[in-house]
Amino acid sequence: MRDISKPALARLAGLGDWPGFDLLSDRAGDGTRCIEVKGRAGTGDVFLQDNEWAKAANLRDRYWLYVVLGCASASPALLRIQDPFGRLTGTTKGGMALRLGDLRAVAEQD
């Protein structure tokens, strides 16, 4: 897994400064995952920037949204959503605002 969350790291991976996701994960037999990570100290809705939502639209099944809830707690929870563009709707406000309930409804179950 490679961190590409900062422009210099993205350039080292051969990408532009703002690729629209934070991590590249090459998984044997599963291909490459382009992962956007969002964290919340407690719970709450998630906001994707325009470039993140556009990349989700372009990459579809290869794009994953990982939402970590309860980052400030002793027991954080991870929601993993493959193809958020195809599975979620939201409100546009200079990006895409996604409701927590919708995220939970489509997240992978462990």
Image (cartoon, helix red, strand yellow):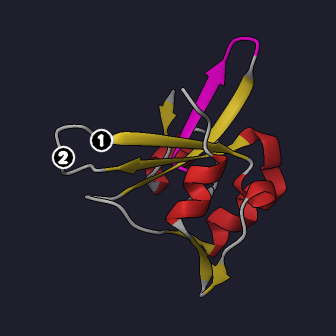
Q: Position of residue 47 (x, y in %)?
A: 52, 71
User: Given the current orientation, which residue lies at the most extreme bottom position?
Assistant: 93
Report the front residue among 43 and 94.
43
Residue holding disc 1: 76
* Residue 34 placement, left or right of 4: right
Q: Position of residue 21 (x, y in %)?
A: 58, 52
Instruction: Inspect the magenta stretch and tell me whether residue 58 lies in it.
Output: no
Tell me the element at label 1.
loop
User: Given the current orientation, which residue lies at the most extreme top position?
Assistant: 28
Query: Which quadrant of the view contains residue 95?
Result: bottom right
Determine the residue positioned at 46% across, 69% down: 45
Tell me the element at label 2.
loop
Magenta span: 21-29
Residue holding disc 2: 73
The residue type indicated by label 2 comes to: Ser
Q: Quadrant of the C terminus?
A: top right
Q: Position of residue 105 (x, y in %)?
A: 62, 52
Local packing at callout 1 (Cα closer than 10 Å; few below 14, some 14-19, many 20+) is some
* Residue 71 placement, left or right of 17: left
Report the front residue among 57 and 72.
72
Establish if 69 lies above or below 100. above
| CA distance separating discs 1 and 2 | 6 Å
The answer to whether residue 96 of the structure is visible from this angle is yes
Establish if 41 lies above or below 28. below
The answer to whether residue 18 of the structure is visible from this angle is no
Query: Which quadrant of the view contains residue 96?
Result: bottom right
Establish if 74 lies above or below 56. above
The residue type indicated by label 1 comes to: Pro
Q: Are marks 1 and 2 in contact (CB under 8 Å)?
A: yes
Establish if 50 lies above or below 69. below
Report the front residue among 37 and 73.
73
